[in-house]
């Protein structure tokens, strides 16, 4: 059921109260204009959350990339968490993962023709992307990955992701819960997506959650679920073999993501057996971790294979010490999101309608090659941030 992954540390609630004071004060500074939010002429769509832990940001950003990449020139701007570089980095086809982080690297491998960049300071990143430095391409829309709380940018559409299993209405502020700001922060969202929903969610549950979320009329609520593509090998050693059927395999599920439980629950009915091997989010696999992996897999009964996430696969590819058996048996489980209750068309039209209204004139009616950069694209708009209304889209 919804909220079933929530655990509140009641004894830490007094500290959460103090944390809330700080978060409320920061938001107050933005609301009264002491801290400034900047709007841009180039359409900007932000995807993020107000909780610690995974809500499915990367699959939802990838959904937007797939929706838009054949229509406009898309750029994805991320912080590049745990990268070894600093400042603005524009990803090329040979840029190593260490320079941009695992999630941007994953997206660049999947979408080589899409502009991917990282910069902790998002305002600077946007300015660089909208200049001619971005491979000389005129960027039509920028997707901000994990930027809901980066309030120095005023996006045209603010998308808030909420994990079905950790609904923010039942959670508490850090450190007692996982909220990074008070619940009223959800009011900044133009679109709210309840993610990782069970596929069998009943109409009554949709209505109950919709009522409980308490959104305003200007906010749109959607529900999405995870879909799994066919397994694919991580290393060429596994490519020569027959793709394993999970129903005939003892699976070692290797994860280094924030919320692996949903993946475990989804794959459990598909496999002969599943043994989880869990590491922290964005974990860098060191020699002792690789030894642990090698030994755990060696001890498992045959037939067997290892399944991991796309994000973890990017880090395992550069890890040293993997045994030959592990390399032959390591597969990645690609994941996509799917909108539920026939909401996909409505969501797509909201996104495309916003870009159509705020991009260069008739941009969606032209081939991408005809898009020309404008000299004014580097400067942020001097106007007040636009208020987006979806009613006319």
Image (tube, rainbow, N blue to C red):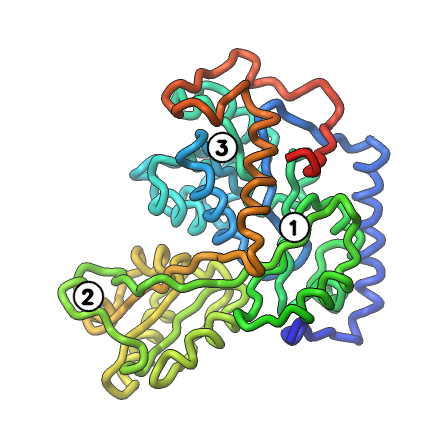
Above or below, comparing residue 3 to residue 145 in the picture: below
Above or below, comparing residue 333 to residue 275 in the picture: above
Tell whether 27 sits left or right of 50.
right
Give me the residue at 54% from left, 56% from top.
Answer: 339
In whole angstroms, how far apart are the C-alphas of marks 1 and 3?
Answer: 25 Å
* Element type at mark 2: helix
Above or below, comparing residue 178 to residue 103 in the picture: below
- Find the residue positioned furthest to the left: 240
- The answer to whether residue 54 of the structure is visible from this angle is no
Q: Quadrant of the N terminus?
A: bottom right
**Percent coordinates x, y for residue 209 in the rendering:** 71, 65
Picture mark count: 3
Q: Label 2: how many residues lie within 10 Å, few (<14), some (14-19) or many (20+)?
A: some
Q: Which mark is residue 18?
A: none
Give me the residue at 84% from left, 61% from top.
Answer: 17
**Percent coordinates x, y for residue 296 in the rendering:** 33, 80
**Residue annotated with mark 2:** 238
In whole angstroms, how far apart are the C-alphas of marks 1 and 2?
Answer: 38 Å
Q: Label 1: how many residues lie within 10 Å, few (<14), some (14-19) or many (20+)?
A: many
Q: Which mark is residue 160?
A: 1
Of 84 and 368, the residue lying toward us: 368
Tell whether 368 sits left or right of 164.
left
**Percent coordinates x, y for residue 32 in the rendering:** 86, 34
Tell whether 198 sits left or right of 192.
left
In whole angstroms, how far apart are the C-alphas of marks 2 and 3?
Answer: 36 Å
Of 58 and 353, the residue lying toward us: 353
Q: Which mark is residue 88?
A: 3
Task: Give the number of the mark in front: 1 or 2.
Answer: 1
* Element type at mark 3: loop
- The answer to whether residue 147 of the structure is visible from this angle is yes
Q: Quadrant of the C terminus?
A: top right
Residue 306 location, quadrant? bottom left
């Amino acid at each position: 059921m919804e909220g079933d992954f929530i655990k509140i540390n009641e004894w830490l609630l007094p500290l959460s109260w103090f944390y809330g004071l700080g978060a409320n004060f920061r938001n107050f500074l933005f609301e009264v204009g002491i801290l400034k939010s900047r709007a841009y002429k180039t359409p900007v769509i932000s995807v993020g959350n107000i909780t610690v832990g995974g809500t499915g940001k990367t699959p939802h950003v990838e959904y937007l990339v797939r929706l838009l990449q054949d229509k406009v020139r898309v750029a994805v701007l991320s912080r590049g968490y745990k990268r070894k570089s600093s400042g603005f980095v524009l990803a090329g086809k040979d840029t190593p993962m260490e320079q941009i982080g695992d999630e941007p690297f994953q997206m660049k491998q999947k979408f080589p023709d899409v502009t991917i960049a990282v910069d902790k300071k998002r305002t600077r990143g946007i300015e660089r992307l909208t200049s001619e430095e971005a491979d000389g391409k005129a960027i039509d829309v920028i997707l901000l990955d994990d930027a809901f709380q980066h309030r120095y940018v005023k996006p045209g559409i603010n998308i808030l992701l909420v994990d079905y299993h950790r609904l923010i209405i039942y959670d508490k502020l850090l450190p007692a819960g996982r909220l990074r700001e008070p619940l009223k922060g959800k009011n900044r969202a133009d679109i709210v997506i309840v993610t990782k929903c069970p596929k069998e969610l009943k109409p009554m549950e949709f209505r109950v959650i919709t009522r409980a979320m308490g959104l305003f009329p200007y906010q749109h609520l959607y529900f999405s679920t995870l879909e799994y593509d066919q397994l694919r090998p991580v290393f060429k050693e596994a490519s020569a073999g027959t793709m394993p059927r999970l129903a005939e395999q003892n699976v070692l599920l290797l994860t280094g993501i924030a919320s692996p439980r949903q993946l475990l629950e989804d794959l459990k009915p598909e496999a002969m057996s599943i043994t989880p091997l869990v590491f922290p989010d964005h974990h860098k696999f060191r020699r002792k971790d690789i030894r642990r992996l090698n030994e755990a897999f060696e001890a498992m009964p045959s037939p067997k294979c290892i399944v991991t996430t796309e994000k973890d696969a990017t880090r395992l590819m550069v890890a040293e010490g993997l045994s030959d058996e592990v390399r032959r048996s390591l597969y990645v489980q690609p994941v996509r999101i799917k909108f539920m209750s026939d909401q996909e068309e409505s969501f797509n039209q909201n996104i495309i309608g916003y870009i159509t209204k705020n991009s260069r004139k008739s941009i969606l009616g032209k081939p991408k090659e005809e898009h020309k950069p404008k000299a004014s694209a580097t400067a942020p708009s001097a106007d007040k941030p636009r208020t987006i209304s979806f009613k006319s889209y």
